[in-house]
Image (cartoon, helix red, strand yellow):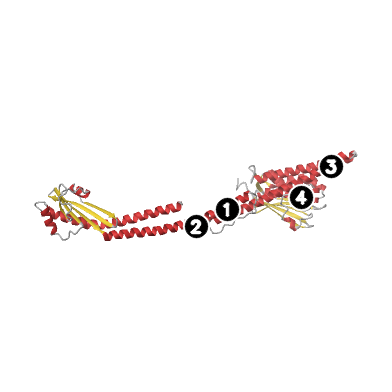
């Protein structure tokens, strides 16, 4: 509607403007000749000794060039001494042009009326410096008037056709626009009701098409995150259910059976270790949730990696000894990265602990830290069982375990590598795995190096 109203306004303005401009052009072309005629008559009349109807008509009738629609000559009181139509002779003429001429002005007015151009002019008649009368002329021009009328009719018709096109276009466009917007709104309602798989199809090549595509991408992302959420909740409940079921089973056994103190102590110890596993899992889940909600923690600072790797090494010495795994370190000094100490510790610990957990007795765990160009590269290599190729893409997923029974037996929750991945990617780093079944696994973590001199 706004579109139609605006074009209507513009076309109406153009119609009026074109008509006015053409009328003004015609008036201007007429003004010169008519004023000249009027002044010529005025000059002739001013030569008369006596100004009365007969002297005036006498002199005017000699002037062939004064062919106009109406010619009136008045005395200084405005009484008509001559009227070419003969209608107002002797009457007082109170036409505005005559009044102005008697005040000493040359007057010209133009008017367009019903296909006629009407031009009026009046000029004073002087006897020396005294105004003794006025000459008034009217000229009706129907030829030029018809031209103006044609122009008006034509511009009006063209405008009408244009406006009809505009209305037609606006109708087609707005109905297609509201149909397409309706489609998007409808899809929004469907998605609000939980059908995240729904897609909107908007044809065309305009902004609405882009909006439709963006909308589909958004719902795809929503669908993925909804699926991830569902899987996470079901995996988490499953993981929590298993130790809880064991605890309940052990507790029931203790209650029902008449146990000897040693077995009972063993059962209670098992309950303790299941509870400990639950504890570890909830701690890891909490840490993952924290990682999900913040990109780079505000307390991140530039720290060298080597001391943290050494700290993890010292902590894991008893575990490695128990598993009969030899640890070898080769660490460069110049690897400062932007991270919190706790997060770096978790990354290194999870990878090195896995390297021991999934190693073979008598195996080796080699940890290297080196600077390559602008990156600090940490590799954790073991000589363990390796990871099957089809599992390598999944190991960074939450709760994913290659061998569930074995991992659970070694206290694994399937969250360690998910935490490593979250931490590393939130610090512009990367983590990758290369593994051969039965030969061993290498995890490679890279972080951009932050040289304190360059990036204080
Ligand atoms: P978990 O707590 O079960 O160890 P992780 O997320 O740390 O969970 O690891 C996921 C799975 O990837 C493990 O269950 C294990 O099957 C496999 N995995 C991780 N590290 C290694 C490794 N160094 N060698 C072989 N398998 C590994």
Say which label, 2 or 4, has the lower sequence index: 2
Q: Nearer the viewer, mark 4 or mark 3?
A: 3
Kindly identify which numbered label has been placed on residue 250.
3
The reply to whether residue 333 is in sight is: no
**Separation of disc 2 and disc 1 at Cα?**
19 Å
- Toward the front, the furthest residue is 87
Say which label, 1 or 4, has the lower sequence index: 1
Q: Which residue is mark 4?
A: 354
Q: Nearer the viewer, mark 3 or mark 1?
A: 1
Question: Does the closest atom of ligand 1 sit within 8 Å of the Cβ of label 4?
Answer: yes
The reply to whether residue 291 is in sight is: yes
Mark 4: few, some, or many residues within 10 Å (few <14, many ≥20)? many
Question: Does the closest atom of ligand 1 sit within 8 Å of the Cβ of label 2?
Answer: no
**Residue lying at 55% horizontally and 53% vertically, measured from the top left:** 181
Question: Does the closest atom of ligand 1 sit within 8 Å of the Cβ of label 1?
Answer: no
The total of numbered circles placed on residues is 4
Q: Would you say 48 lies left or right of 283 here?
A: left
* Residue 113 x, y percent position in the rendering: 28, 55
Q: Which residue is mark 1?
A: 184
**Separation of disc 2 and disc 4 at Cα?**
66 Å
- Closest to the observer: 432 or 21? 21
Q: Which residue is mark 2?
A: 172
Q: Would you say 342 lies left or right of 211 here?
A: right
Q: Secondary structure at mark 4?
A: helix
* Residue 412 x, y percent position in the rendering: 77, 48
Say which label, 2 or 1, has the lower sequence index: 2
**Separation of disc 3 and disc 2 at Cα?**
75 Å
- Closest to the observer: 263 or 141? 141
């Amino acid at each position: 509607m706004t579109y139609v109203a605006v074009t209507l306004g513009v076309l109406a303005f153009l119609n009026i403007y074109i008509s006015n401009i053409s009328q003004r052009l015609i008036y201007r072309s007429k003004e010169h000749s008519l004023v000249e005629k009027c002044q010529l008559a005025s000059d002739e009349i001013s030569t008369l000794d006596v100004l009365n109807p007969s002297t005036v008509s006498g002199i005017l009738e000699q002037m062939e060039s004064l062919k106009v629609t109406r010619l009136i000559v008045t005395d200084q009181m405005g009484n008509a001494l001559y009227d070419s139509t003969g209608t107002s002779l002797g009457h007082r003429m109170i036409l505005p042009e005559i009044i102005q001429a008697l005040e000493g002005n040359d007057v010209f007015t133009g008017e367009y009326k019903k296909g006629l151009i009407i031009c009026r002019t009046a000029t004073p008649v002087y006897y020396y410096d005294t105004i003794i009368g006025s000459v008034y002329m009217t000229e009706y021009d129907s030829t030029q008037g018809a031209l103006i009328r044609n122009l008006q009719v034509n511009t009006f018709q063209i405008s009408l056709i244009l406006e009809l096109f505009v209305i037609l276009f606006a109708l087609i466009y707005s109905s297609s626009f509201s149909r397409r917007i309706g489609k998007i709104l409808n899809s929004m309602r469907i998605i609000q009701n939980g059908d995240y798989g729904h897609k909107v199809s908007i044809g065309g090549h305009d902004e609405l098409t882009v909006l439709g595509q963006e909308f589909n991408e958004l719902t795809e992302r929503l669908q993925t995150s909804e699926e991830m959420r569902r899987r996470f909740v079901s995996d988490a409940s499953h993981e929590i259910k298993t130790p809880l079921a064991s605890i309940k089973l052990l507790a029931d056994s203790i209650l029902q059976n008449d146990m000897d103190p040693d077995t009972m102590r063993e059962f209670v110890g098992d309950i303790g270790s299941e509870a400990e596993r639950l504890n570890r899992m909830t701690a890891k889940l909490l840490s993952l949730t924290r990682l999900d909600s913040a990109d780079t923690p505000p307390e991140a600072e530039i720290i060298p990696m080597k001391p943290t790797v050494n700290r993890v090494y010292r902590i894991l010495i008893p575990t490695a000894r128990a598993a009969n795994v030899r640890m070898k370190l080769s660490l460069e000094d110049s690897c400062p990265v932007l991270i919190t100490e706790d997060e770096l510790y978790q990354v290194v610990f999870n990878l090195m602990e896995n390297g021991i957990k999934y190693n073979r007795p008598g195996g080796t765990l080699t940890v290297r830290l080196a600077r390559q160009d602008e990156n600090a590269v940490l590799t954790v290599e073991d000589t363990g069982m390796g990871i099957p190729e089809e599992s390598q893409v999944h190991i960074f997923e939450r709760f994913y375990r290659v061998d569930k029974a074995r991992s659970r037996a070694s206290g694994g929750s399937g969250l360690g590598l998910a935490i490593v991945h979250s931490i590393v990617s939130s610090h512009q780093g990367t983590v990758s795995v290369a593994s051969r079944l039965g030969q061993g696994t290498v995890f490679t973590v890279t972080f951009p190096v932050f040289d304190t001199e360059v990036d204080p």
